[in-house]
Image: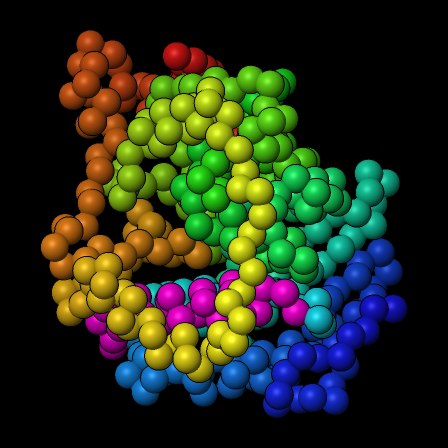
């Protein structure tokens, strides 16, 4: 049974253990989640400047944006490689206040091999259920193995970077090989995750870089998806992004075979979390943020992906259907989008609403 010494100044002699229930293995143990989260949350929050640590649902967009970037730095830089094998994420709650979350990996042994699901513990009042189009996410062992061997990262970052790839990129499904795959932006290039619907769960079968994609087809209208919280989902009419432009960008990267970066840079020697936490405000001000910054969920759908717009840049409002009508008014875009939206929600009866171009 797996057990590791907890890497925390608040519980230096505590061991993180694995939980076993028949064919299931859970790491860390469910009963340990509150204690682990409390210690790590103290490490995160105690180093924050007061103005950031006080941010709650009453905070403005600028304050919430600062807390988001502080959480991402703490989880994805300072805790990306932990000796205890724990994985942390910074996720926004329903009020767009970023919370530190401990990721619990649940592995089920099946006849087709190990399947991996993930739960997220941000305290007794925040345990988000992350889905795509209302469907839970399941990863085969093959996905984790291929991501580990094909995608550059620092040792120990495999799982954290895999989840981040889903949380920090708009998602579009395109034909890759014999079926559909979710295409995600990653480190200036793209990744493909072929999937299928199995027992009302989205099962991801492998991870492909551009080098393993023998074909990629553009489709109109694009099969655009959202990562979100909870089982309820409706395709948004107004978005923050124009999926057709992302398809063109993905396709251009695939044609040019844009490679993965050769290696992830190491942390700067001597860099400390307390110091970086106090630099975040200055870094965001340099990017144009300040009072008046707008902070929102992507497409206004509660989930892990958020958008920030500096005061000088109005929040984007994209009516995807209307934009296609403006470009090619002779096409029956209402019918095409109705079919597309039905498939995005139900994964059935696609009826070729999207045309390869």
Q: Colour scheme in the image? A: rainbow
Q: The C terminus appears in which quarter of the rendering?
A: top left
What kind of secondary structure does the magenta stretch mostly adopt?
A: helix
* Left or right position of 338 against 44: left
The mark total stands at 0
Q: Which residues are magenta?
A: 58-82
Residue at position x 68%, y 36% from top?
205
Q: Position of residue 20 (x, y in %)?
A: 83, 66
Q: Is residue 305 left or right of residue 321?
A: right
Q: Is residue 240 left or right of residue 200?
A: left
Whether residue 212 is visible, yes or no, is yes
* Residue shown at the point (81%, 73%) measured from the top left: 3
User: Is 109 above or below relative to 241?
Assistant: below
Q: Nearer the viewer, residue 33 or 49?
A: 49
- Viewer-side residue, 128 vs 253: 253
**Quarter of the N terminus within the rendering:** bottom right
- Above/below status of 77 relative to 210: below
- Residue 88, percent across and down? 57, 67
Taking the view exactly as shown, the residue that stands out farthest to the front is: 269
**Does 22 lie within the magenta span?**
no
Rendered view: 101 above or below 294: below
Which residue: 53% across, 42% down? 261
Q: Is 61 in the magenta?
A: yes
Quadrant hosting residue 188:
top left
Residue 311 image point, x, y percent: 14, 59
Question: Can residue 89 be seen in the rendering of this structure?
Answer: no
Residue 247, x across and y down, in percent: 39, 27
Residue furthest to the top: 330
């Amino acid at each position: 049974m797996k057990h590791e010494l907890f890497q925390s100044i608040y519980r230096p002699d505590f061991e993180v253990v694995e939980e076993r229930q028949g064919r299931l293995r859970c790491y860390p143990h469910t009963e340990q989640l509150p204690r682990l989260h409390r210690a790590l949350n103290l490490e995160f929050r105690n180093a924050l400047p007061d103005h950031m640590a006080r941010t709650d649902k009453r905070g403005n967009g600028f304050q919430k944006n600062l807390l988001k970037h502080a959480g991402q730095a703490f989880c994805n830089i300072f805790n990306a490689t932990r000796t205890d094998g724990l994985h942390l994420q910074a996720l926004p709650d329903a009020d767009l206040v970023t919370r530190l979350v401990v990721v619990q990996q649940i592995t089920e042994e099946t006849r087709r091999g190990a399947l991996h699901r993930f739960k997220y513990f941000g305290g007794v009042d925040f345990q988000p259920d992350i889905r795509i189009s209302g469907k839970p996410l399941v990863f085969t062992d093959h996905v984790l193995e291929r991501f580990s061997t094909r995608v550059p990262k620092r040792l120990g970052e495999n799982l954290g970077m895999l989840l981040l790839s889903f949380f920090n990129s708009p998602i579009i499904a395109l034909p890759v090989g014999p079926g559909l795959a979710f295409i995600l932006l990653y480190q200036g290039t793209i990744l493909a995750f072929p999937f299928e619907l199995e027992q009302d769960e989205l099962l991801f079968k492998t991870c492909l870089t551009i080098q393993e994609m023998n074909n990629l087809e553009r489709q109109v209208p694009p099969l655009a998806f959202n990562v979100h919280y909870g089982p309820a989902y409706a395709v948004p009419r107004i978005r923050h992004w124009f999926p057709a432009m992302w398809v063109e960008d993905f396709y251009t990267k695939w044609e040019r075979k844009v490679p993965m970066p050769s290696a992830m840079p190491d942390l700067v020697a001597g860099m400390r979390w307390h110091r970086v936490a106090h630099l975040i405000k200055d870094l965001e001000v340099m990017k144009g943020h300040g009072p008046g910054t707008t902070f929102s969920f992507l497409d206004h759908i509660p989930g892990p992906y958020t958008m920030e717009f500096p005061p000088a840049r109005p929040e984007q409002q994209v009516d995807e259907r209307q934009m296609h009508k403006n470009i090619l008014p002779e096409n029956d875009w209402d019918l095409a989008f109705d079919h597309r939206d039905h498939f995005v929600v139900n994964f059935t009866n696609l009826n070729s609403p999207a045309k390869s171009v």
